[in-house]
Image (cartoon, helix red, strand yellow):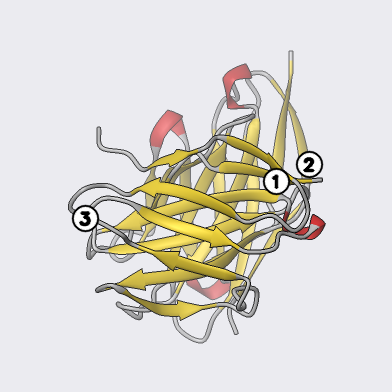
Amino acid sequence: AQSVTQLGSHVSVSEGALVLLRCNYSSSVPPYLFWYVQYPNQGLQLLLKYTTGATLVKGINGFEAEFKKSETSFHLTKPSAHMSDAAEYFCAVSDRVESNYQLIWGAGTKLIIKP
Amino acid sequence: EPEVTQTPSHQVTQMGQEVILRCVPISNHLYFYWYRQILGQKVEFLVSFYNNEISEKSEIFDDQFSVERPDGSNFTLKIRSTKLEDSAMYFCASRISGNTIYFGEGSWLTVV
C-alpha cells in the first residue's frame, strides 16, 4: 500500500530564509505527487503537482518541488519565506488508476515564519 | 475561477442525530469525493463517486455513511446517528478526467 511521510510536524524558519518541507513516499510505481496548502480556517488549496515530464515543478506563491525517483522524494522548497506562507502543508500521492483515483495523504507540516 | 462549494461551513449536532453535508462540485466535473480530517490527524479518504454510483470507499465509510447526487449539481454526505468521533472537517472534492482533485473549503462537524 502506498504511504506518505512528511518529516517534521512543525518547521520554523525566519522571514526571508529558505523553506524546505520534506516528503517521501512509498509506491511500487511512480505515482502522481501533490502538495496542498491549508491556511488557518480554510480548505485545501493545490500548490503544485507532478505527473510526468520535468521533475522540477513550479507552483503558486513561489514554491517549487522536485521529484526524485531514486530517493522516492518530493520535497517542497521556497527560496525566501514570507509571513503569508505560514500555513499547514500536505504532501499527497495517488496511483494512476483512472476511475478509482484517490489521494493518500501525509500527516502535514505546519510552517511557522519568524519575523 | 470555478470552485467547489460546501455548506454548512460549521455544524454542531447532538450525538445520535443525522447530519447532511452538502457540496456543489465544479460544474463539468465527473468524479466526486469526500475526505475527512479529524483535528490533528491526517486527511482520510472516505468515498469516491462516479457515474451515479460509489466507485470506491474506505473502511471508514461504513453503513453509517451514505452519499447521494440528488440532482445535477449537489453531492451530499449523510451521516446517520452521529458519534463523538465523527467530529472532523469534511472535505468535498471533484475532478474532471485529469489528475487534479479540487477541494472545497470544508465543513466543520462538531458532535456534542
**Of label 2 and label 1, which has the lower sequence position?**
2
Q: State the count of labels.
A: 3
Which residue corresponds to the image point at 24% horizontal and 74% vertical from the top-left?
A: B51
Q: Which mark is residue A10?
A: 2
Chain at numbered mark 2 = A
User: What kind of element bears circle 2?
Assistant: strand
In which quadrant of the rendered image does the C terminus of chain B lie? top right
Chain at numbered mark 3 = B
In the rendered structure, which amino acid carries the disc numbered 2? His
Q: Position of residue A2 (x, y in %)?
A: 58, 79
Of B49 and A78, the residue lying toward us: B49
**Above or below: residue B63 compared with residue A107:** below
Of A12 and A87, the residue lying toward us: A87
Distance in Å between CA atoms under marks 1 and 3: 37 Å
Q: Which mark is residue A109?
A: 1
Which residue corresponds to the image point at 32% horizontal and 49% vertical from the top-left?
A: B25
Tell me the residue that label 3 is attached to: B72
Q: Position of residue B42 (x, y in %)?
A: 69, 58
In the rendered structure, which amino acid carries the disc numbered 3? Gly
Extreme residue toward the top, this view: A115
Q: Position of residue B81 (x, y in %)?
A: 69, 63
| Number of other residues with Cα within 10 Å of mark 2, as a class: few under 14, some 14 to 19, many 20 or more | few
